Amino acid sequence: MKQVLTFLSCILLSSFISTIASAQNVANSNEDEINTGRRIYLEGILPSGTELTGTRFGNTLVSGSAAACVNCHRRSGMGQVEGDIQVQPITGNFLFATAKDKQLATMDPRVSKRFNQAHEPYTDASLANAVNRGINSQNVEMNQAMPRYNLSESEMKALTAYLKQLSSKWSPGVTGSNIRFAMVITPDVDPLRRKTLIDMMTLAVRQKNGSTEVAKQGAGGRHHMVSAAEFVLGTERNWTLDIWELQGAPETWGEQLETHYRSQPVFALISGLSNSTWQPVHDFCEHDQVPCWFPSVDLPVNSTSQYSFYFSGGVTLEADVLARHLLEQPTQPRRVLQIYRDDDAGRAASLEFAHALAGSKILVENRILPKGATAESALQQSLSKVKRNDVVMFWLRPDDLSALNKIKPVAGIYYFSTILAKSEHLNIAPAWKAHARLIYPYELPEKREANLAYFHAWLNLRKLPVVDEAMQSEAFFALNFLTDTIAEMLDNIYRDYLVERAEIMLSKREGAKSEQETRDRVYLGKTGDLERKHGPLTADESVRIHFADQQSYQGKSQGTTIYPHLSLGPGQRFASKGAYIVRFADEKSDKLIAESDWIIP
C-alpha cells in the first residue's frame, strides 16, 4: 500500500511539474509574441529581420522605420492629430472595448471638446482587415494616409498581442485616486533656495488637493479643471509629492534614486533643483522611463532624450548664443578669455563655447579659478594680462562675481552668464557695469513683469517671498503645466502619453493661459483684495473666480513664464531656444537694454 501511494505521489508531482512547465512555456511564448509585435510597432522590423512595408495614398511605398506604427500612433498608442486628421488610439483598451466599457480620450488640444470617435469593437480578424486592407470595424475604408500592410497571420498575431497590452494599465505611481510625484534636489544647492522651492511646491500641491476635494464634493470654482470631461468622468486625482534629497558624490546618486524608486515608485519627477551635474538624474529617468518635468538646473543634459524636458539648454545654450553673436559682429574680437571656476557648469560652458568657435579666427583661452583659491586673488591673477581689445567671458557664480568690485577693469567688453549669476542684478560696481554685457535667456524685464504678474499675485496672496524669481517662476510653471496636461489626459495616465501631450500642448497652452492669467491678475488685485471682496479663503485657496465684466480687461500678456516663448514639437526637449545680449542702461542703473535681437544658435 505504501508503494502504491508513493507511486501515485510521483505521478501527481510529475503532472504538477508538467503543468507549471506548460504554463511557463505559454508565458514565454506570449512574451516572445509581444516582443515581436513591439519591434514591428516601434521599429518597422518583421520577425525575419526584413523591413515592414506598406502603401499609402494608393501607390506611395513606405518601409522600415518610416512604415512603423509609432510614427502616427505614438509610443503610447494613444494617437495624435495631424492637421485635420485624428489618428485614433489603437491600444487594446480602445480597439476591443465594448460599448459599456468605452474609453475616452481628448484628441485635439486645439478643440477641448473633440474626443476619440466611437466605433464597433474590433476582433482579431477585423483588426487584421484594417491593418492589411484599410477597412475598419464598421466596414468603412480608412483614410489613405494609413498605410496598407501585408502582414502574415503570425506577424499580425504578434502585433495584436503587443497592442492588447500597450497602455493597458496605469503607469507606476498611479492609483484610481492618487498620482505620486517626486522632486529631486542635489546636495550642492544653497539651503535658502532649497527651502524656498520645497515650501512653495508643498503648498501648491496641498492647495491643488484641496481644490480636488472641493470638486469631488460637488462644489464649483476650482481653477485648474481644463475640460468638462475631466469633471464629468471624475478622473481628477489627488497628488502626493515626495522630496528626494540626494547626498554625497554624483557617482552615488544613481543608486540613491533607484533606492527611492524601489521603495515608492512615482509617476514622474516634477521640477527639481541642481547647481551641478544633472546627468545621473537624467540617466535614471531614461533607464526607468520616468518623465523628468522641467527641473531648474544650470546644466541640462544636451543629448537624445525620451523622458526629460528642460526649460532651456542652460549654460551651454548661453555659450552657443555668445559664439554666434561674436561671429556675426562686423569686427570680430581676436581673443576671448574665458574665466570660470573648475566645476561641472564652468567646464561644460567653456568647452561648448570653445567648440562653437572652433574653426573661426577668434582665439579662445581659458583662465581657471583653482579650487581652494580665494576669489579675489584668483580673479586678479586671471585678469592680469587682459589687453584693451580682449573680450572676457565670466562663467561665475555670485560669490566669485562679488570679488570683482575690488578689481579695476581694463577697457573692453565683459560678458556674464545670467544663469550662473542667478540674477541680472549683478552685485558689481558701476565701473564694471559700463563694460558689462549679459547673455540673457529670459524675457526682457518690462515684458517679463507683465508675463509674471499672475505668478507674483499668487506669491503675494500666500505670503511667499521672492528669493529667486527665475527658479520660483519655473517651478510655478512646471506645476501648472503638469496640472493642465494631466487634466487633458483624463483617465489615460500613462507616462509615454504624458510626454506626447506635453509636446503638442505647450504652445497652445501658453497662448490661452497668458490671456486667462492676465485677466485673473487684474481681478485679484493687491494682496488681500480677494479676501475683502469674497470673504475668507476656502479649502481651495487657488480658486479662480471668473468675473462677469471681462470687457474691463484691456491688455494682453504674451506668456506665463520668465521666458519669452516656450514651444515643443515631437522629439523636442528644450522649450526655450535662445537668448538676448543685454547691457545696463548706465553705470548707476540696474535697467537692462537689449543689444541684440533674440538669438537662436
Image (tube, helix red, strand yellow):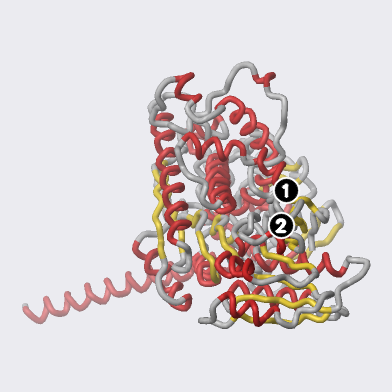
Residue name at image x 57 percent, y 49 percent: 469
Q: Which quadrant is the N terminus positioned in?
A: bottom left
Kind of residue sitting beneath label 1? Leu
Q: Are circles 1 and 2 on residues that touch, CB within 8 Å?
A: yes
Q: Secondary structure at mark 1?
A: loop
Residue name at image x 43 percent, y 60 percent: 191
Q: Is 33 in front, or is 555? A: 555
User: Separation of disc 1 and disc 2 at Cα?
Assistant: 8 Å
Which residue has dot 2 on it?
Answer: 440
Kind of residue sitting beneath label 2? Tyr
Residue name at image x 48 percent, y 69 percent: 29
Residue name at image x 64 percent, y 81 percent: 368
Note whether residue 195 is visible.
yes
Q: Which quadrant is the C terminus positioned in?
A: bottom right
Residue 547: x percent and y percent?
A: 58, 20
Which residue has dot 1 on it?
Answer: 444
Note whether residue 41 is visible.
no
Residue 308: x percent and y percent?
A: 58, 61
Identify the image quadrant of residue 294: bottom right
